[in-house]
Amino acid sequence: MSGQPGEHADPAVAFESAKLGVWTFLATEVLLFGALFTAYTVFRLKYPEMFRAEHAKLDRVLGAVNTVVLITSSLMVVLGVDAIKRGKARLFEACFGATILLAAVFLCIKYMEYTAKFHHGIYPRTNLFFSIYFMLTGLHGIHVLLGMGVLSYVILLSRRGRLSASYSTPAEMSGLYWHFVDLVWIYLFPLLYLIG
Amino acid sequence: MDNVLAFGAASGQAGRVDALFVMITVIGGFFFFLTQGMLIYFAVKYRRRLPDRDNETPTITGNPLLEFLWILIPSLVVVVIFYYGWRVYTDQRIPAAGETEVRVTGRQWMYEVTYPDGRTAINEVRVPAGKPVKFILSATDVLHGFYLPDFRVKMDMIPGRVTTLRVQPDRPGRYQIFCTVYCGTGHSNMLAQLIVMPPHEYAEWVEHGGREGGEGGKREPLAVRGERILKSAGCLNCHAVDGKEKIGPNFRGLYGSKVSLEGGKSVTADEEYLRESIMDPGAKIVRGYPNVMPTFKASIPREDVDAVVEYLKTLK
Amino acid sequence: MEGVERIAAERNGRGYLSERGWRSWAFTLDHKRIGAMYLWTTTVFFLIGGVFALLLRLELLSPQARYFSNHTYNVFFTLHGAMMIFLFIIPAIPSGLGNFFIPLHIGARDVAFPRLNLASYWVFAAGFLVIIGSLVAPMDTGWTFYTPYSAKSAAAVTTLSLGIFLIGMSSILTGLNFIVTIHKLRAPGMTWHRLPLFIWGMYATSIIQVVATPVVGVTFLLLAAERVLGVGFFDPSKGGDPVLFQHFFWFYSHPVVYVMILPAMGIVSEVIPVFSRKPIFGYSAIAYSSLAIAFIGFLVWGHHMFTSGMSPLANAIFSFLTFFVAVPTAVKVFNWIATLYKGSITFESPMLYALTFIFLFIVGGLTGPFLAALATNVQLHDTYFVVAHFHYTMMGGTVMGFFAGLHYWFPKMTGRMLNEKVARLAWALIFIGFNVTFFTMFIVGVRGMPRRYAEYLPKYHTENVISTIGSAVLAVGILVMCWNFLQGLRKGAPAPANPWRALSLEWQAASPPETENFHEIPHVTAWPYGYGTPKA
């Protein structure tokens, strides 16, 4: 007979299921962002001059800082998952906490960038480059925010003593999601900020 | 006129589409009778007669040869249908010499017709019988459709773009035009007529300013108007019509030619290319020329852009 | 309820249905209850969507506007399409019957993520509530929402876009759950080649849901952004391209028709062998053809757009690939018919509907080549020929398959039997009504009548009157069928565990099953199609 409703009797099966589930979910996310990247490609090919001119208006320094911030946050996730797999719950909580902090920094910088653009009269409707810019970074930003929520929840689980060396699934799965969010940015940054 | 499957009724091209339709019907009919026949035959023949011996059926789980055959044969059949569908379609798109060109623009909920000589009409197109016709289609507000059921063809009308449709009407008569892309409340009332006239009647209509259908009085031919606008909008500051090359590409012989672009691609200079070059010059840069042409999107209205394009087409 | 009490209650024959109270439903983690909730919800939307269809047919009795204004008619066909597609036909078999039977078929106690499953239902509910909310300013864009019209429309398109986004999320969560369930929770001995074909069909369906749905989510997001933020991806005056919307939209909406048909085909693959007492012919071919259909289905979206100004080369490629979807589909049809050969066939209602599926789907399928071939497509696109084609495949196909599944599994889900005589009467009315309604549409489409026309030329009058009469018969048939289901629920004879003497695992559970499905997880040693041997 099964144990708690919603849990599986065999932890190995549960872990394997969780892993397949998260990877499948990430596949859907690839398609979600993929559709927007397709729109980017279509319009870049159609208006190469406009893209070249407009992309220079983005702040490369802030973009680069954000890239470093996100990569560091992924590093924190790796350290955190490693910590909890060695049973070190407090260290894990600190690492994931740092990740959330860095994510907040990322969002603050994006906020600064957005408001600077609005201040200069540049909005999503201004031209197709900025339509794509705001939609892509906006959707990405929403994913960062949701990720912060998920990571907070996992820290909460740890504070309640639910995570251990033998049960670190929530940490690993949320970590996978976070790496994906980071990866999307690593594509976004050069495509939007750097390529002329 | 309802000439379903009436071979060659409105045009030879329609007859070829009908032949394809019949071919697919025959092939489909064959498979229909084969499969439905077997379905019904087996259902009847193998209905249960002995309820207590219903498990004495043969344990047949498959037959690789049959599987192979019924993968192979349908595959071959569909390739044949594809081929003919593609051939007839491609033949519909071949430009012909001596085409009568008519511009039709859809807007909610009517068709605006403009002839090369500047004459306009609403919801009515007149062409001579026996000569190929090229419709140059666009829309002002939302998507519309241009469907000639008697000719078995249609093409969408897209705002911001030009699409083309070719027919060769062989028989005089009045033919229905339907809008086939949903465009709002008046969609089902957006109807028009294609009036195919015997050549002498058509010539008479052209000469007498088209009192039936079309605004009365002679209008400035599109190409003449286009030349006027070209000169007044400053195009000749950078483009030559003859003689010395200026900053931008020469216009003579441009229409219909193959243009090499920056980046290696090349494109045929059709109506769409000319229109785009005026509205969005940065989209395609001609190889060897600087990207300095300004856009005329705000300064030249759409009808005038059409006129300029018509003028450029005369520069052979 | 405490475990012991629950077992006692369930042993009095009500199984998973024993526990009462709205909370036991709203917060359930039982896949069977979640499936049942989806079934009820989607059936309600089927009936509402059907009412809109009847209103359309009523108006089409007269060539000119008579009962409704043209605008109202246009709203009705939009709502008919959008509700039928998003709120009925996509979720009904997968999230309804799939949720109920996938764990039972593979010998599991539940799906991989029961909480996610419950969440998928509530996200679906949120979606349909938002969609209903959008009715304050109802759409008339058609269920395809083509830009620029949908971007400019004064209707509540943005709200509806959000609703469809939520429905899409629900679909993704369901598909994800099923993929993991089928991979990881099969009972010992249940190898891939011992899976019921319904599972193969659901697996292929889930892959499509997971891969295609995000794209339509983004499509509606971009449409909403165009309306709210003024972005111009689809707006020619801003340099955008209205046809780009069509590419995004159909990249999802073509594969989604295979989400609609594959589960129904899976049901047919289950029913035919049981009522022929013969093994399914060509198990592997049918199983792999589901995957083939899913794969090819992603490559053909452009065949909805042959007249949209795409290049002739693109048109040719899409036309060529479209024809190849027919091949794995034909494979299934031939295999089902071969299963009947030398069988011992009876015609209970599940079998009637399964055979009807094959018959009507063949008609729908054979009218596909007319639309796949470029030249005839240019003639028939956006005419009633297309409307007939997709109703034969989606209603003659999927809906008949759905009805087959409902009749087949009714005893298992409810513990009661249906009245066979009434079921057959309903079937006859539905079969006759369906064909009269929709066959005339092929004719009137070839004669040139465009679709989405509130008013039409008088020469199309006769066929339209005949079609409407057919729709009335069809409606009566469906009502009789629904009445039969309701009567069955209340007063049906108690059902044995295995009334059809079928071999798949769900019939080893009680009728209705206990919450945990099986007393003990079965150990599987054979495939579920061993009919025709004395043991079966």
Image (cartoon, coloured by chain):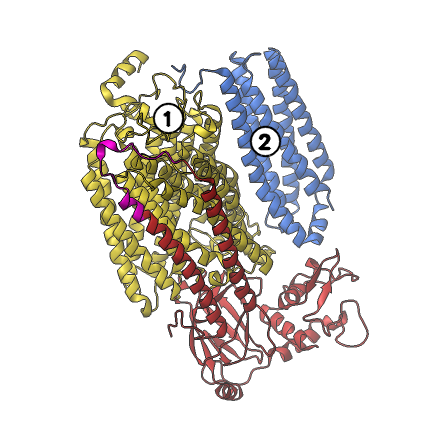
Chain colours: A blue, B red, C yellow
The chain under label 2 reads A
Residue A6's spot in the image, x, y percent? 42, 20
What amino acid does circle 1 point to?
Leu
Q: Which quadrant is the N terminus of chain B positioned in?
A: bottom left
Q: Quadrant of residue B61?
A: top left
Q: Nearer the viewer, mark 1 or mark 2?
A: 1
What amino acid does circle 2 point to?
Val
Question: How many circles with numbers are drawn on the protein?
Answer: 2
Magenta span contains residue C415: no
Q: Is residue B125 left or right of residue C445?
A: right
The chain under label 1 reads C
Q: Which mark is residue C391?
A: none
Residue B135's spot in the image, x, y percent? 54, 71
Magenta span contains residue B41: yes
**In this view, C150 is above or below A145:** below
Mark 1 vs mark 2, CA separation in Å: 38 Å
Q: Which quadrant is the C terminus of chain B positioned in?
A: bottom right
**In this view, C261 is above or below C54:** above
**In this view, B152 is above or below B55:** below
Q: Residues within 10 Å of mark 2 (few under 14, many from 20)?
A: many
Judging depth in this view, the residue of C125 and C430 nearest the camera is C430
**Residue at (39%, 59%) from the top-left corner?**
C385
Q: Report the magenta residues as a range.
A: B40-60
Judging depth in this view, the residue of B204 and C403 nearest the camera is C403
Q: Secondary structure at mark 2?
A: helix
Residue A51's spot in the image, x, y percent? 69, 50
Q: Which residue is mark 1?
A: C104
Q: Which residue is mark 2?
A: A144
